[in-house]
């Protein structure tokens, strides 16, 4: 029996059908991939919470802080599962990507380009006070303090936070100069590189770098350990009514002292 060949029209019809199916399936696959990445980011934040709680247990309830040679995440190195040598932590430089991995500190959706040989840091605790020499800024409402020079470490105590389920401790912050370890963004770079612990205003000033823009939401870790996705504006709602601002977060989810 002679085999019947496909005509050109039949081949074109099949190609067209495949193209239509691909146009329907690929966006769905893309959305599923982005949703999966967002879930991984949430899981990372929950693991950071566990590490932070172990740290507070060993440090009289105080959250980790930033100093000149060690960032807040350096202080968690003994609790977050990383095998980092102390000599690499107590320095004024970022951790090397050729020696270590980001672990839970990198959100898979974070595609912000950074300098070579640094580890991606996708998160930041909410900034509290800044102490350094003659410079003192005590007007902030977060949990994690910053100090350099002769000042004593300053951070909030978890036992002093009244509304743990309604208070943000850590948020997604994707920036080119946000990397794991000291250096780049840390206290000695004040006025230049900035800090590895930033203010809500800095978050609202970098919304273009939020990796879940298709949902319009970002992930937030709360003091009690749960992670929730909110639009940026939703985090500024004041518990007693009204809406705060990026410059004044009193009474909002960002306020650890309400």
Image (cartoon, rainbow, N blue to C red):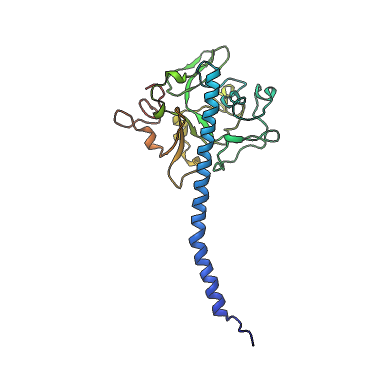
Q: Is residue 107 above or below residue 142?
A: below
- Say left or right for 160 vs 116: left
Q: Quadrant of the N terminus?
A: bottom right
Q: Is residue 22 above or below residue 113?
A: below
Q: Quadrant of the C terminus?
A: top left
Q: How far across and down, in percent of the image, does residue 187 sit?
A: 56, 22
Residue 194 in which image quadrant: top right
Residue projecting furthest to the bottom: 1
- Say left or right for 249 vs 25: left
Q: How far across and down, in percent of the image, does residue 169 sit?
A: 46, 28
Residue 141 in which image quadrant: top left
Residue 68 in which image quadrant: top right
- In this view, the residue in front, 177 or 144, is 144
Residue 65 makes an appearance in the image: no
Residue 225 makes an appearance in the image: yes
Q: How far across and down, in percent of the image, does residue 4 sit?
A: 61, 84
């Amino acid at each position: 029996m002679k085999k019947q060949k496909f005509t050109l029209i039949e081949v074109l019809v099949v190609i067209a059908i495949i193209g239509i199916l691909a146009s329907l399936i690929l966006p769905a696959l893309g959305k599923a991939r982005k949703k999966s990445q967002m879930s991984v980011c949430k899981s990372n934040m929950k693991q950071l919470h566990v590490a932070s709680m172990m740290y507070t247990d060993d440090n009289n309830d105080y959250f980790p802080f930033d100093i000149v040679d060690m960032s807040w995440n350096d202080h968690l190195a003994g609790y977050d599962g990383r095998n980092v040598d102390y000599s690499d932590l107590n320095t004024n430089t970022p951790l090397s990507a050729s020696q270590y991995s980001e672990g839970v500190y990198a959100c898979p959706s974070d595609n912000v380009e950074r300098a070579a040989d640094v580890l991606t840091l996708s998160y930041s605790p909410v900034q509290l006070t800044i102490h350094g020499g003659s410079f003192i800024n005590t007007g902030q409402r977060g949990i994690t303090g910053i100090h350099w020079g002769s000042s004593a470490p300053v951070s909030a105590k978890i036992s002093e936070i009244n509304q743990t389920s309604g208070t943000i401790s850590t948020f997604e912050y994707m920036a080119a100069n946000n990397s794991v370890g000291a250096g780049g963004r840390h206290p000695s770079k004040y006025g230049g590189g900035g800090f590895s612990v930033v203010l809500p205003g800095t978050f609202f000033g970098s919304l273009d770098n939020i990796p879940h823009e298709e949902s319009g939401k970002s992930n937030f870790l709360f003091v009690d350990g749960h992670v929730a996705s909110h639009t940026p504006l939703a985090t500024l709602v004041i518990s007693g009514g009204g809406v705060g601002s990026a410059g004044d977060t009193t009474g909002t989810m960002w306020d650890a002292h309400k």
